[in-house]
Amino acid sequence: MESGMTLEQIYLFWTALLVASLWLPPAIGRFLHHGMPSREDYRAGRAIGEMDDLPDWVRRANRAHLNLVEQFGPFAALVLLAGLLGVTSDLMGLAAMVFFWARVLHALVMLSGISRFYIRSWIFAVAWGAILTIAFDIAWQVS
């Protein structure tokens, strides 16, 4: 990707595509299990999380998407703030890369159902640590 983007902005781009695409597995799972949503489903505003009869992998896929949505906001805000302030560093780029790959791994682990050693929580914590690293690096550079 040849442009004036920093490494953290490049990983913001890829993370945005990831969060924009993670709705597909739960939507496909719901379709495979229930078929096309009925008018009543739309009228009632039934969400995947409210449908207890869906297979576990569909509910996990939905949770993986929602979990990334929750972390994407702070990640994106910090990367965009760094861009507005004109600050960047190798550490910030590395943290953004770690965040992206941790989130990819988190989604794969969630979909697979692996639940040993609190692996999902550890991966989430790594992504959170990457967000904190970016935040502290910004604070360090502007102070």
Image (spheres, grey):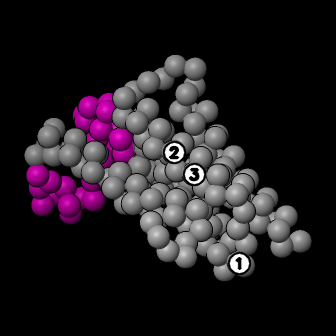
Q: Is residue 83 magenta?
A: no
Residue 52 rendering spot, x and y as whole percentages: 30, 36
Kind of residue at badge 3: Met
At horizontal 49% and vertical 74% (from top left) the residue drawn is 3
Q: Is residue 43 magenta?
A: yes
Give the magenta part as a residue range.
36-63
Mark toward the start of the polypeptide (1 vs 3): 1
Q: Nearer the viewer, residue 90 or 83?
A: 90
Q: Nearer the viewer, residue 120 or 135?
A: 135
Q: Which residue lies under the disc numbered 1?
A: 86
Q: Which mark is residue 97?
A: 3
CA neighbours of label 2 inside 10 A, class few (<14), some (14 to 19), many (20+): some
CA neighbours of label 3 inside 10 A, class few (<14), some (14 to 19), many (20+): many
- Relative placement, left or right, of 28 versus 130 is left
Residue 75 rendering spot, x and y as whole percentages: 60, 60
Q: Which residue lies under the disc numbered 2?
A: 101
Residue 6 rendering spot, x and y as whole percentages: 59, 68
At horizontal 28% and vertical 45% (from top left) the residue drawn is 25
* Residue placed furthest toward the right: 143
Evaluate whether residue 52 shows in this view.
no
